[in-house]
Amino acid sequence: MMELPGLVPVVKGNGYGFGVHRLAGGAGRLGADVIAVGSVAEAKVALREFDGDVVVMMPFFNADAAAAEIMEDSRVIVTVAHLPELARLAEGPAYPRVLVEVRTSMQRHGITLDDLPKVAGFLDRVDFAGWTIHLPMPAGDSNLEEATHIGTAARMAAKAPLWFSHVSVDDHNRLREIFGPDVRLRRGTDLWLGDPGALAVTATVLDVHKVVRGQRVGYHRKSVPANGWVVVVSGGTANGIGLEAPSTNRSMRDRAKTMALGMLDAAGRALSPFEVAGEKRAFVEPPHMQSSLVFLPANATPPAIGDEVPVTVRNTIATFDEIVYV
Ligand SMILES: *Cc1c(COP(=O)(O)O)cnc(C)c1O
């Protein structure tokens, strides 16, 4: 927080693998005054774990009863991305804290630049917290041009803080020179997952069975391709482990594509994200709910029950059984 004035930690979805509750608490310990969540449901969790303000980034709709209820909390700031919704809020009895989203080249949400002058008429009847500007990932290494263009248009419509997403730290610093200190930067991935070396994901070996070529194993009675071992590892669909089995590939062309992507082993079986005895091993069959079967050929040294083996997952879709700080 000290090194990056204006930083707003983003805490949403599966909490980048750590859970919204854990990151919300962590953001407080980092000294954040405000955090950003995706949804109303996440805001409820965040409000319990974090003492400061909570921005809900998904657009606000008056018809959403849960959103209308949470906006009455004095620590909540809602994001409004549609003029009729802003008009309804301005007409209503509440005086909610509101960020107004401006459309960018990303074309996700937001009021267009042409409509910005219409926003000003509503702003005295809400507690206007600023403009939110969510840019696409920088094409080169900079989004400064679009950020400056949209920031300038927004500031002409109403002088208020500018909240950017997906600008680099360099661009953020430049934007603070251009627009002053009321510039905020929302960041999630770089903040929580920026140092891959800080994280190690492992699966536990739950069982190891010697098998012979042609032996049928698994839910689907698949025959194993050679002598070796079936290794049962923890981690399945409930943890975000998912992969198409090669038999579901419709054509040889699909199969070649999958192979080119490095997802099949030499014999054409789907490569699992589990590394056993030094290599990624093939699935015997698609992952089960909480465990997976992988095949280890006879020339490899089998692991022991209880061993931890490396597993490659995307943190933003993974659900971990346990998170350990070392
Ligand atoms: C998810 C999100 C972010 C954070 O994105 P990262 O790429 O994880 O840093 C920022 N702003 C908005 C509006 C988002 O939805």
Image (cartoon, helix red, strand yellow):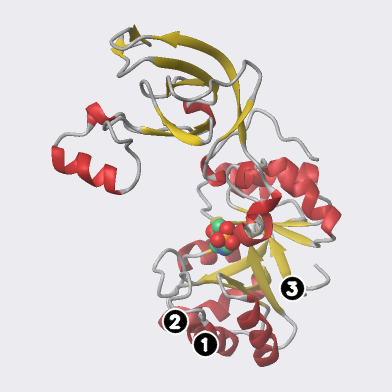
Q: Secondary structure at mark 1?
A: helix
Q: Is mark 1 within 8 Å of ligand 1?
A: no
Mark positioned earlier in the residue sequence (1 or 2): 2
Question: Residue 18: horizontal and vertical position, in percent?
Answer: 67, 42
Q: Is mark 3 within 8 Å of ligand 1?
A: no
The kind of residue on which mark 2 rests is Leu
Which residue corresponds to the image point at 49% horizontal and 18% vertical from the top-left? 231
- In-front residue for pair 118/265: 265
- In-front residue for pair 199/82: 199
Question: Residue 293: horizontal and vertical position, in percent?
Answer: 45, 19
Question: Residue 115: horizontal and vertical position, in percent?
Answer: 44, 79
The kind of residue on which mark 1 rests is Ala
Query: Could you give the CA–CA distance between mark 3 and mark 2, rounded to whole angstroms?
Result: 24 Å
Question: Residue 253: horizontal and vertical position, in percent?
Answer: 15, 43
The disc label shown at residue 153, or none: 1
| Foreground tag (3 vs 2) | 3
Query: Could you give the CA–CA distance between mark 3 and mark 1, rounded to whole angstroms?
Result: 21 Å
Q: Are marks 1 and 2 in contact (CB under 8 Å)?
A: yes
Which residue corresponds to the image point at 40% horizontal and 9% vertical from the top-left? 211
Q: Are marks 3 and 1 in contact (CB under 8 Å)?
A: no
Q: Is residue 47 left or right of residue 273?
A: right
Q: Is mark 2 within 8 Å of ligand 1?
A: no
When asked about the image quadrant of residue 266, the answer is top left
Which residue corresponds to the image point at 67% horizontal and 40% vertical from the top-left? 19
Above or below 206: residue 268: below
CA neighbours of label 3 inside 10 A, class few (<14), some (14 to 19), many (20+): many
Residue that badge 2 annotates: 113
Mark positioned earlier in the residue sequence (3 or 1): 3
Residue that badge 3 annotates: 6
